[in-house]
Amino acid sequence: MLDELSTLQQWIDQSTSIVFFGGAGAFTESGIKDFRSVDGLYSQHYEWPPEEILSRTFFDHHPEEFYRFYRDKMLCLNAKPNAAHQKLAQMEQARKLRSVVTQNIDGLHQMAGSKRVWELHGSVHRNRCMKCGKSYPVEFIQNSKGIPTCSCGGIVKPDVVLYEESLDSRVLEGAVTDIHRADLLIIGGTSLAGYPAAGLINYYSGKHLVLINKTPTPYDNRADLILTGPIGELLGQIEVRE
């Protein structure tokens, strides 16, 4: 692993337009469960499967049950950025990192100091009334009972992309553009099993593709470098040099 880290350090030193593309594994070291691991959300049991609860159809037909699950399992407001979030923020500040593309909705990248973050699946920190458009902080959702409602009477919906909903076109275009322009793409903490997010790798045409994950992915044969292990522990060992 020392050789792989040395190679990654060299490539980061030589790069001026890095993009990091991260998934749920990027926040497990912050104490948040991912979805597809052995003890993740998808392996736990509820009256309905998580995939069904987190769908737009379920939200529309069973909003009270949706919010019960959402408050219990999707809001982890005590989580703090880990070494990976912090290192990426340092790389951006040193003008090495172009942007972060994330499938996560926790806002930890911004909490660590990252500025250019493409949130493919939205954020729990943005919530808006479906009727009048008024914005509400995440604490409003957390502290509300039943179905959170606006002063106008409309339902306050989190700005997260549910199953059956499309990704935000502006966010998707921004992520595609940055990945296409990157000279180093680091993918970490994702199984690369979900689409359309996993398909973003096809827009990359830079020098080196690096995968950091605990388990193999369908794209391992396309990687120039593979590091196996916790992403915070590995990225935390990188030195950021301007």
Image (spheres, grey):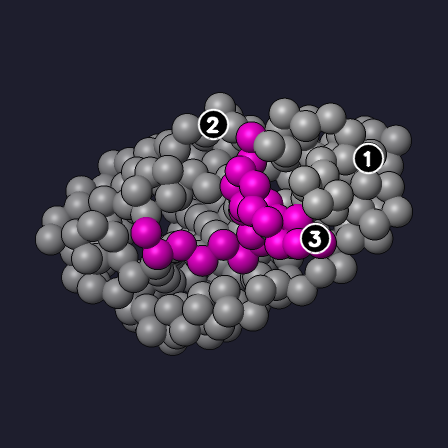
Return the residue nearer the eye: 94 or 14.
94
Which of the two marks, 2 or 3, is nearer to us in this view?
3
Query: Quadrant of the rendered structure where residue 18 is?
Result: bottom left
Write the residue at 58% across / 53% down: 121
How crowded pointer 1 is (Cα within 10 Å; few <14, some 14-19, many 20+) is rated as some
- Foreground residue, 68 or 90? 68
Q: Nearer the viewer, residue 127 or 96?
A: 127
Q: Label 3 belongs to which residue? A: 130
Q: Which residue is identified by label 1? A: 64
Dot 2, crowdedness within 10 Å: few (<14), some or many (≥20)?
Answer: some
Q: Is 116 included in the stretch rendered in magenta?
A: yes
Q: Secondary structure at mark 3?
A: loop
- Image quarter of the N terminus: top left
Residue depicted at 56% across the width and 41% down the height = 136
Q: What crowding class fits label 3: few (fewer than 14 Cα within 10 Å), some (14-19), or many (20 or more)?
A: some
**In the rendering, at what x and y percent does residue 229 appear?**
43, 37
Residue 20 point in image, percent of width and height = 38, 55
Regarding mark 2 in the picture, which secondary structure is present there?
loop
Q: Is residue 166 left or right of residue 98?
A: right
* Mark 2 lies on residue: 79
Q: Earlier in the sequence, mark 3 or mark 1?
A: 1
Residue range (magenta)? 115-139
Q: Is residue 119 left or right of residue 128?
A: left
The amino acid sitting under disc 1 is: Glu
166, above or below 140, in the image: below
